[in-house]
Image: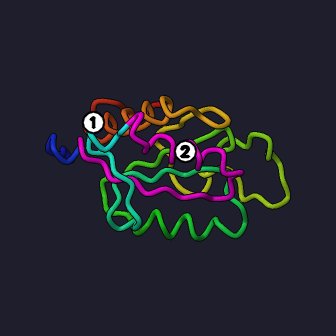
């Protein structure tokens, strides 16, 4: 499905903390501040997954959050893109912990990864650019 240019350039983002240490959450907030100002490109943080085009998942998925993450993903309308943010998406320091269901990719499909612990705002913006390319069909969804 091809999207028109205006829709693909005005991404609404829903942020989901699945058990992170809040380092990535602080970087998401730093990215939204006037220094980087992604809202000038149409990128806006929304409070409901039903209005979102992009789901940003931070942290490894704990037992309590696995079902909730799946439910949030299912509430989003198609087309949608999932960004896995931080080193915790592949386990990171919490690898093989007793309280984890695993990385987000074992619960829902993740399209774009933003590495780092925590990733810098520039890396978050790069991840959003990759999400735009995925929605436009320019990129095969590679990381």
Q: Quadrant of residue 74?
A: bottom left
Residue 78 spot, x, y in % from top left: 31, 58
Mark identifier at residue 84: 2
Front residue (pair 48, 84): 48
Q: Is residue 95 above or below residue 70?
A: above
What's the magenta region?
Answer: 9-36
Residue 14 spot, x, y in % from top left: 43, 57
Q: Which tag, 1 or 2, sits closer to the chain's start?
A: 2
Residue 39 spot, x, y in % from top left: 31, 44
Q: Residue at x 37, y 63 (%)?
A: 76
- Residue 14 among magenta residues: yes
Q: Residue at x 67, y 38 (%)?
A: 87
| Label 1: which secondary element | loop
Query: What's the distance in space between the residues labelled 1 and 2, CA to CA?
Result: 19 Å
Q: Is residue 48 above or below residue 52?
A: below
- Residue underneath mark 1: 137
Q: Quadrant of residue 68?
A: bottom right
């Amino acid at each position: 499905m091809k999207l028109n240019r205006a829709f693909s350039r005005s991404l609404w983002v829903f942020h989901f903390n699945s058990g992170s240490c809040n380092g990535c959450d602080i970087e998401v907030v730093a990215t939204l501040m006037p220094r980087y100002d992604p809202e000038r490109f149409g990128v806006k943080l929304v409070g409901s997954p039903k209005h979102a085009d992009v789901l940003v998942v931070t942290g490894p998925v704990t037992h309590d959050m696995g079902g909730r993450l799946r439910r949030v993903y299912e509430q989003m309308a198609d087309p949608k893109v999932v960004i896995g943010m931080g080193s915790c998406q592949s386990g990171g320091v919490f690898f093989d912990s007793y309280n984890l269901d695993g990385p987000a990719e074992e619960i829902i499909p993740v399209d774009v990864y933003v590495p780092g612990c925590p990733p810098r705002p520039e890396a978050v913006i790069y991840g959003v650019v990759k999400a735009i390319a995925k929605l436009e069909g320019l990129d095969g969804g590679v990381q």
